[in-house]
Every structure is written in structure tokens, then in C-alpha cells.
Amino acid sequence: MLSRRDKLYTGIALIIFLGLLGILNNTLSGYHMRLINLIGINIILVVSLNLTNGFCGVFSLGHAGFMAVGAYVSAILALPLTKKALVLPELPTWLGSIEVNFLLSLIIGGLVAAFFALLIGYPVLRLSGHYLAVATLGFLIIIQVLITQLSHITRGARGINGLISYTNVWWVWGTVIVTIYAVWRIVNSSYGRGMLAIREDDLAAESLGINLTSHKLLAFCVGAFFAGVGGALWGHLITVVNPLSFDSNRTFNLVVMSVVGGMGSITGGVIGATLMTIVPELLRNLEVGITIFGMSIPPLYGLSQIILAGALILVIFFRPHGLVGNWEFNWNFLKKSKNISKTTQNL
Amino acid sequence: MSGTYLLQNLIDGISLGSIYALVAIGFSMTYSILRLINFAHGDILMIGAYSGLFIMVAWQLPLWASLLGAMIFAAFVGMLVERIAYRPLRGSNEEATLITSLAVSIFIENLGIMVLSPQPRGFAIPKFLTKLHTINEITISNMTILIISLAIILMLVLTYFVICTRMGVAMRACSENINAARLMGVNINKVVACAFAVGSGMAAVAGIMLAGQYGRIEPLMGFVPGLKAFIAAVIGGIGSIPGAALGGYVLGLSEILLVALLPAAYSGYRDAFVFIILILVLLFKPAGLLGTLEGRKV
């Protein structure tokens, strides 16, 4: 738990950060603001993924599937009635005649995603390691197939376009703060300690009386809830949702962010998401052809992904637990050094 | 529902299953020794298909030479990947190796996009393979016959290799217990490289067969067959070579038969069926059809 001093520092930092966001929001171009919002959404997704994959050791590759569920549910619910009649004429009447506000659509999107997690998690979480990874990847593929096939609800492969761009910097970063707070509270609760125990040794944890199923399910469902919310925010940022946006590549990208930052740490999730959103964006400039000294280099499509993959392999070789490992951000660096040894809490 | 319709679909299923089986065996071999899920295996299949096309078109060589050349080249690439990406990680945890293989897969796919262009290319097979035989309203192309017979031949050769040669015995020893095998004087690096080479060579054959059947290839063609072959390996019992072959056939057959027997409206759900089968098998037989569960020492 935070001491009063830490609470004060955190509050001040939050106010400064939000003020900075407000200033940036009024000065930066649309492209840069979009990038900042993408960073926030990726932080939501990666921190929630870390709860499942990193803290509880339930290595799931289904995160993009939960994103898709949240994005679609929220898109369908929040679409204005006039547009709904035009874009989705074949909806069941009860669904076609309601329009909820954005906040409620986010929450319902997240809850439906969490419900799916409960449904799939109950049988699948009995597996472990590789088997679990593949089964959750299977869930992702099943969701994609369902979205493509249920075209009277989802418009199939065409996707739902013309969503209202509700998502702005306050929605995104507000959700980021809620996500980080929720995950932090869970990790530091008795449930979170149980999850850590399961990650370290499930057999020992079980013999200590920790209920494996309920702990794993909790991590899985909370992770899915925030994945759904993140997906919904993402859909209303891009204003289009289609099944291809939530394919296995997206899951892999999220896993890469989580691994690069450090799976077992909230700070790691934030750093990984920020870094791996900005770097590919910078590398994208490499993919346009350039001419140097009369020698023209054709556009090298895929180069940025190659560099990313190479970087990922190097991170695993040299820092197998990610850039920050299990370290969490704290305010101890402001304190006199002699107290650090007492207060540092490495998970 | 006539008998010929069923038989026709059975043959199609066996042909698809042969391709899955060839890829799944490679998966299983590397998994049984290293406990490594090689997501890049499907991309080796892509490399095999491209090198086969190159040999046929650029050097104007016949199909058998292209198959052989592609096998050798893919085996080389497989060993290279193992040497560079997987060997430094030997002995680290499951997640690290899983993610590395994902990274290798992304690397190869995008290298393919960069070097070979993302556009699909036509893959023309020699004329005699497209010839159709019709027996009692069942049509079989020479291609299907080639796929099925080649898969069986390769599996027989592999069985001989694993049972009767020194390297095969070493390989089985490593999959039983890699540390004990090392203490007995088995050269682990050699065995692992050999497993990658054999698995990659078989994937290359599967790649050319797949390309021949669909008539086109692209840099991302390996992902879906790679994933499905992995599922086949898990269904059959990952780590067991006969299991992988069985899983491949079970998956190929059930994929084709489910689509054939269910109403046409459900045919789009084909990939979903595959994963539902997988989840069901894992729930009722967690070690797969022919696998054995490893006991845990406490």
C-alpha cells in the first residue's frame, strides 16, 4: 500500500501529467494526438495482458479476441439509431432499436468480453503452458470466424464503418488510469499474491490452499474486461471495426509489447506499450523508397517488422524478463538512500 | 448423401491430411526433443514452396529435382534458424522459446514480403499431374495420388530412419530425456540440428504439394497450414511421431467431412471447427490421442 507521502507524489504526478496532456491536446497535430491515444490504448491492453500472462502465468494468446468482442459490442450499441438502420438493417429489433451512451457501451463491451472469458476459461484454464497458448489462439480464430459469418449482426468481413469518433485523449487516458489502478489493486491483494504463487509453482500454491481455478479465472476475466474496453476505445478511435483488425498479428504485437517491457510488472507493460507503439511508427519511414547519390532504393515493405522481430529476439537473449523485469515504479529514488533497503518491494 | 460423394470427400480429406501430417511430424520432432513450439515451421514450408518454384522456373528442372532441391534448401534454413535463434535459448522457460519462435516467424514472413514481394505468384505444376482419372464418378487427379503416395513414402523412410539408424536412436534417446542422453555421450547439437533438418525437409515437400494444389504461393502462405499442423500434432499427442501423422489425417479428414456433411451455410465455419475439435481433444485427452502425460516430480 502507498504511504501518505507516495499518495501525495502520485497525485501531483497525475495532475502534472493530465495538464501536460491538455496542453498537448491543443498544440499537437491530429496525427500526433492519434499516436498518443494509440499509446494509451496499447497500455490498457498490455497492462491487462500482463495480469493474465505475467502475474498469473496463464499464457494466453486470445487477447485480440476479447478486444474484438468488446469493440463489436460497443460499436453496435453506441451507433446512432439513424445510422444503425442504414448500416445494420438486419439487426434483431431489440438490438436495432437501442442506442446507449459511450461510457455504458464501453462497460457493456468489457463485460461481454469478460463473460466470453468465463465461458472459454472454465474448460481451457485446466491446460497449461503451450497447450493453453494454442487453445486461446484457437478461441481468437473462432471469434474471427464467428464475426465473419454472423453477417446480419456484424456485417461480416466488410466490418462496421462510420462509427462516431467518441474516443479522445480523456477517454483513453482516463481508462489507462483506471486500468493501472485496478490491476495494481488486484496484484497487491490476497488474490494477487495467490496469482503470483500460482505463477511460481502451481502445485505448491494448490497445496497451500489456493483455489487454482478461481484465481486463474479472475485474472483471465479481468484481463478480458480491459481488453474489451481497450478494443472498444480502439474501434471508436479508428471509426471502423472489421475482423481483420483483430487477427493473430494483433495478439502477437501485444505479447511482444508485454515481453519487451517485462511481463511481470505494470511498469513494464506501460514501458513496453509506449516503446513498441512509437518505434514501429518511426521505422515506418524506412518503408518509403529513397534516393541517395543517384542510387534509388525501392520501398522495402516489411522492413520495420523485420527490425522489430530482430529486436525482440535480442531482448529475449539478453534480458529474458523484459526491459524492467519484475521491477515496479516507486518514489523511493526521491528518498535518502539509507531508507531504500527497507522500503523497496520487489515482487 | 450418396456413397460416391462420401468417398470423394474421404479422398480429398486424406490428401489434405497427408499435407498436415508432413508438417505436423516436423513440429513434433522438434517439440519432443526441445519442448519448443516452432511457430516458424509454417514459414519454412513457405520457403520450401518458393525454392521449389525457383528451381522449376529458373533452372527448368523437373518436379523431382525441385522437390529434392527444396528439401535440401529448407533443411539448411531450418538448421540455420535453430543455430541462430534457438540454440542460445536452450534450457530457458517455455514462454521465452515460444516468443522467440514467433519473432522468427514474423522475421521470415516479412523478409519474404520484402524480397519476394507480397503479391501471390502462380505455381504451375507439370501437365501430367493435372490429369484427372474418373472411376465410378470419383475423380482423382495425379496430383492427389502423388501427394498421398509421397507422404506415405516419406513417413516410411522416416520410420526406418528413427528406428534403425544410429541418429534415429540418438533422437529417440533425446526425446526420452535429453540430459541423460547427453551423459551417455550423445551429441545433442548434432541431434537437434538433424531433427530440424528432417522436419524442415518434410515441410518443404508439404509446401510444394500445397502450392501445387492451390496453384499459387505468397509469403504468408505458411501461417495457416503451420498453425493447423501444430493443432494436428497436439491432437495426435505432441512429441509422438506416429501421433503427429495420425493427428494430421484426423484433422484433414474431419475438416473436409464436416464441411461436406453439414449444410452449405456452415462451410464458412471450417476453421472454427478445427479449433473446437482441438479444444475438445485437449479437454478429454490432455496428452493427445497417442501421447503420454509426463509425470511431475514434487
Image: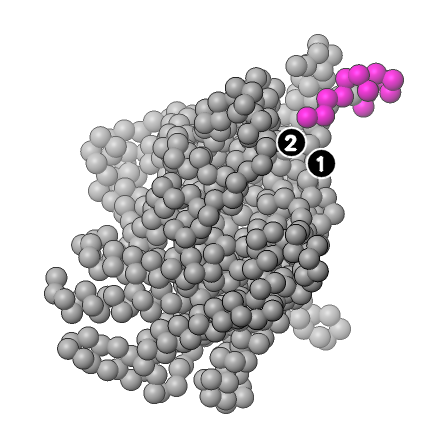
Give the image's coloring scheme: one colour
Q: Which residue is mark 1?
A: A324
Total of numbered circles in the picture?
A: 2
Q: Nearer the viewer, residue A342 or B277?
A: B277
Q: Position of residue B119 (x, y in %)?
A: 47, 70
Residue A117, quarter of picture: top left
Residue A344 seen in render: yes
Q: Residue at x 66, y 14 (%)?
A: A1
Q: Residue A163 at x, y = what percent?
A: 39, 40
Q: Quadrant of the C terminus of chain B?
A: top right
Check contact, mark 1 vs mark 2: CB within 8 A: yes
A335 in the magenta segment:
yes
Q: Earlier in the sequence, mark 1 or mark 2?
A: 2
* Whether residue B72 is situated above or below residue A36 in the rendered picture: below
Please state the horizontal and vertical placement of residue A81, each as a whole percent of the image: 28, 33
Question: In the image, is residue B207 above or below residue B274?
Answer: below
Q: Can you see residue B102?
A: no
Q: Nearer the viewer, residue B218 or A319?
A: A319
Q: Is residue B159 left or right of residue A105?
A: right
Q: Quadrant of residue A30?
A: top right
Magenta region, residue range: A333-347
Q: Residue at x 39, y 86 (%)?
A: B126
**Which residue is at 40% across, 82% downward?**
B125
User: In this orientation, which residue lies closer to the viewer: B298 or A44?
Assistant: B298
- Would you name the residue on which mark 2 appears? A265
Q: Is residue A57 left or right of residue B88?
A: left
| Subunit under mark 1 | A
Task: Check the image and report above or below for B211 versus A62.
Answer: below
Our reading of the magenta stretch's main secondary structure is helix
